[in-house]
Image (cartoon, rainbow, N blue to C red):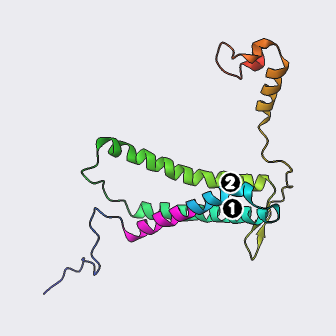
Amino acid sequence: MTTDPLESAHPLQSAGHYRLGAIAFHWAMFVLVVIVAVLGLLHDSWPKQTQAFWINVHALIGILLWLVLLARFGYRLRHMPPALPTDIGAFSRRFSSPVHFALYALMFVIPIFGVVTFIYHGRIFHFGLFDVNFGIRKTLRYLSPPRIFTDIWRMRSSRSRVCTLLPPCGTILCCMTAC
């Protein structure tokens, strides 16, 4: 019996199934997202003595999530997902790609915002064996609203009655010049 030299000793999975690597990445991302979300939601309920520790754990797991996501992107570029089953409806078929793209975009962008916020507050990443300090002084308050919003609020409350209603153009920013 002769065998084709191009055939693999390990046959490919059928086109209708995800590979083991894709499944592992999926569940790893799920577990990391749940852990980071729970730690983020519990942020205000931690005692002040341990709050910095748990915020650091939240940030480090968020960075790990981001790195796993980058590895998942690389895996997905090399291993295309299987085609959708034929019994999937038109609505699901139409929106599956945009919804997946939106989820990937959120999982990519949210940890970046988290790291920026972490650094803005003057926190130091404690990795156990070493620390990463960006040299930013610790802020006393949490993110204050951008100045334009506080200025608009002051103008709205200190000016005439015209500013308490929306201007004809319908935007609150117009109120800055209309009053």
Q: Which residues are magenta?
A: 19-33
Q: Residue under label 2, please give it.
A: 114
Quarter holding residue 174: top right
When the figure is inspected, residue 179 is found, relative to residue 79, above or below; the finding is: above
Residue type at mark 2? Gly
Instruction: Say which element carries label 1.
Output: helix
Q: Residue at x 33, y 41 (%)?
A: 91
| Residue drawn at point x = 67 percent, y = 51 percent | 113
Disc 2 secondary structure class? helix
Three-letter code for the amino acid on which mark 1 is drawn: Ala
Residue 92 appears at what percent x and percent y?
34, 45
User: Predominant secondary structure in magenta?
Assistant: helix
Magenta span contains residue 166 = no
The mark found on residue 59 in the picture is 1
Residue 156 in the image: state x and y as whole percent.
79, 21
For the residue pair 135 and 118, the one nearer the viewer reads as: 118
Name the quadrant of the C terminus.
top right
Point out the residue furthest to the left here.
1
Q: Is residue 3 visible?
A: yes
- What residue is at 42 percent from the left and 66 percent from the top? 23
In the depicted view, which residue is nearer to us: 112 or 55?
55
Mark 2 vs mark 1: which is more N-terminal? Answer: 1
Q: Which mark is residue 174?
A: none
**Is residue 34 or residue 84 the one in the foreground?**
34
Relative side of 79 to 72, left or right? left
Disc 2 + disc 1, Cβ < 8 Å: yes
Residue 107 in the image: state x and y as whole percent: 56, 54
Q: Quadrant of the N terminus?
A: bottom left
| Quadrant of residue 164 within the rendered picture | top right
Residue 68: image x %, image y %? Answer: 55, 65
Give the CA distance from mark 2 to mark 1: 7 Å
Mark 1, Cα crowd under 10 Å, few <14 / some 14-19 / many 20+, is many
